[in-house]
Amino acid sequence: MSTSYTCVLTIAGSDSGGGAGIQADIKSISANGGYAASVITASTAQNTQGVTDIHAIPVPHIIAQMKAIFDDISFSAVKIGMLHSSEVIEAVKETLSEYKIKNIVFDPVMIATSGDKLLNENAVESLKEFLPSVMLITPNIPEAELLAGHSIEIENMQESAKELGELYHTSVLLKGGHLKLSDTMTDVLYNYESKKITIIHNKTVETKNTHGTGCSLSSSIATYIGLGFCLEEACVKGCEYLNSAIDAGKDKVIGKGHGPVNHFSL
C-alpha cells in the first residue's frame, strides 16, 4: 500500500555553520515529522560568531528552483525566511501565486541581532505588500516594531499583535523573546480569521545557544500546519518544540559563539 510524506518547503538562505536558515529549517521540519525540500535564496559564509560574506542567488535561478519542485511535488505547507531584495520578494510572491500555494508561514527576517536593518526601504515596502498573501507571520519584537511603527512592550503585545494582523490582513505570532522580564517566555498569537488571541507561555531558558531559533520555530509551525493541526494548535506545539530544543541544547558547546538549539531533542 502506497503512502505519502507530509512535504514542507523552506524558502530561505543557507547558513554554512548549520545553525540557522535552510539548515535549521530542514532539521526542524524533519524533527517534527515532515519531509523537507528547499529553495535557496542566498548563500552565506557564516559560523557561530557571525556572517562574513553573503552571495545572492540570481532571481531566475530562485524561480527555477521553485518551478522544478512545484511541477513535481505537492506541499502541505511552505515556510519563508529571509528574502533579501524587492526583486526576490516579488519573484517568490508571483511564483507562489502562480502555483496557488497555500499554508504559507513567513518569518520576516528584517533586522540583525546587532539591530541593523537587513533590508533597504524598497525591500521593506515590497515585504509589507507580500504579507496579506500569507497565512501567518512570525515577527520578533524589533521586526514587529518596524512593521507597526511604534515600540512594543509586554503590556501592549496583545494589542500590537491584533494591530499588525488587521493592518496586513494576516495572522500574527508575535514572539516575546526580546522581552525577557521573568522566568516565563510569552508569545502572542492573533488569528486574523477568527479574531481570536491566544497567549502562549513557556519557561525561559538561560543559554547563549539561541542561533536559528526564529527559523526553527517558523519551520516547526509550518510542519504542524501541514500535518493538519489548526493554527492555534500548530503555534502552541511549535513553541513547545522550540522551548524543548533550546533547553536540550543549552549546555552544548559548538564553535566559539552562539550555538544552535538541539533540533532532535524530542
Image: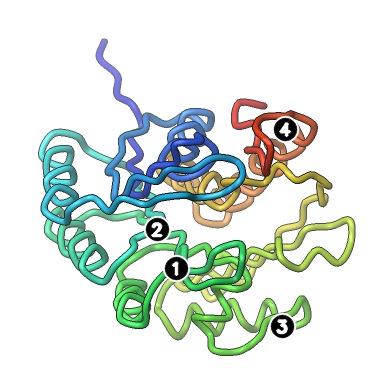
2 vs 3, front mark: 2
Q: Label 1: which residue?
A: 118
* Quarter of the image where one finds residue 181: bottom right
Q: Closer to the camera, 11 or 229?
A: 11
Q: Position of residue 185 (x, y in %)?
A: 78, 58
User: Do we see residue 12 in this rendering?
Assistant: yes
4 vs 3, front mark: 4
For badge 4, the amino acid type reads: Gly
How many angstroms separate mark 3 from mark 1 (CA)?
26 Å
Q: Residues within 10 Å of mark 2 (few under 14, many from 20)?
A: many
Q: Position of residue 234 (x, y in %)?
A: 54, 49
Q: Label 4: which residue?
A: 249
How many angstroms separate mark 2 from mark 1 (CA)?
9 Å
Q: Residues within 10 Å of mark 1 (few under 14, many from 20)?
A: some
Q: Earlier in the sequence, mark 4 or mark 3?
A: 3
> Which residue corresponds to the image point at 67% horizontal and 46% vertical from the top-left?
210
Which secondary structure lies at badge 4?
helix
Identify whether 249 is placed above or below 211. above
Q: Residues within 10 Å of mark 3 (few under 14, many from 20)?
A: few
Identify whether 239 is placed above or below 93. above
Q: Closer to the camera, 174 or 180?
A: 180
> Which residue corresponds to the image point at 72% horizontal and 83% vertical from the top-left?
156
Which secondary structure lies at badge 3?
helix
Q: Earlier in the sequence, mark 2 or mark 1?
A: 2
For badge 3, the amino acid type reads: Asn
Which secondary structure lies at badge 2?
loop
Q: Label 3: which residue?
A: 156
Q: Position of residue 202 (x, y in %)?
A: 77, 51
The dot on residue 82 is 2
For badge 1, the amino acid type reads: Leu
Q: Decide: marks 2, 1 in contact (CB < 8 A)?
A: yes
Q: Closer to the camera, 27 or 118?
A: 118
